[in-house]
Amino acid sequence: MATEKRAFNLKEEQELFLTIHKLLSEQKLGALATHRHGEPWATLIAFAAADNLNLIYFATPKTTRKYSNLVNDPRCSLLIDNRENLVSDFSNSIAVTATGVIKEVDEFEKPAALQFFLNKHPYLQTFTQSPTCALICLQVNRYNLVRRFQEVMEYYPGR
């Protein structure tokens, strides 16, 4: 798999940003990857990404393995894709991996962040109101976009 390492001009970078933004706006679920003691763990999560792509919010019970893994090591990645389980996916699908570190949203930031998350996922309101539920913020360092299974591009939000 070849990774696109060249510098993008402004137009190409804007197109890459818009492609990632569109995918994250349209998709509701992603696969969160964490680890503990060298053992990988992946789980589906509902997420909401900030318009500038710097932050991704998700909610999880504090009693889960993913929460425990993230407390022990806040580094993680989140895979979001648009596959439909069709043959055409081999030429048309796009996958984006967001990598970064998480932090639990503090009480000061929580009302606005939770409302942002619930705007995308209103059916999760009861779930997020549980006293054992944590609202988590993934601070994205890098996105890797893959299309046609071999075109790989990197995008760094905030640059």
Image (cartoon, rainbow, N blue to C red):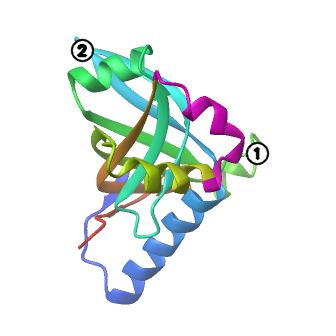
Between disc 2 and disc 1, whose residue precedes? 2
Residue at mark 2 to residue at mark 1: CA–CA distance: 34 Å
Decide: is 110 above or below 53: above
Residue 85 is situated, as x and y percent measured from the top left of the image, at: 75, 40
Could you tell me which residue is drawn at 65 percent across and 32 percent down? 126
Magenta span includes 74: no
Residue drawn at x 48%, y 28% as measured from the top left: 60
Query: Going by the image, does 158 lie left or right of 50?
Result: left
Residue behind mark 1: 87
Q: Quadrant of the C terminus?
A: bottom left
Q: Residue 90 appears at what percent x and percent y? A: 65, 49
> Label 2: which residue?
38
- Residue 74 picture quarter: top left
Question: In the displayed structure, would residue 88 be above or below residue 154?
Answer: above
Region in magenta: 119-132
> Mostly what secondary structure, the magenta segment?
helix
Residue 120 in magenta?
A: yes
Residue type beneath disc 2: Gly
Q: Are marks 2 and 1 in contact (CB under 8 Å)?
A: no
Query: Viewed as shown, does residue 30 lie left or right of 65?
Result: right
Task: Give the label on residue 123, or none.
Answer: none
Residue at image x 36%, y 45%?
Answer: 137
Q: Is residue 6 above or below residue 107?
A: below
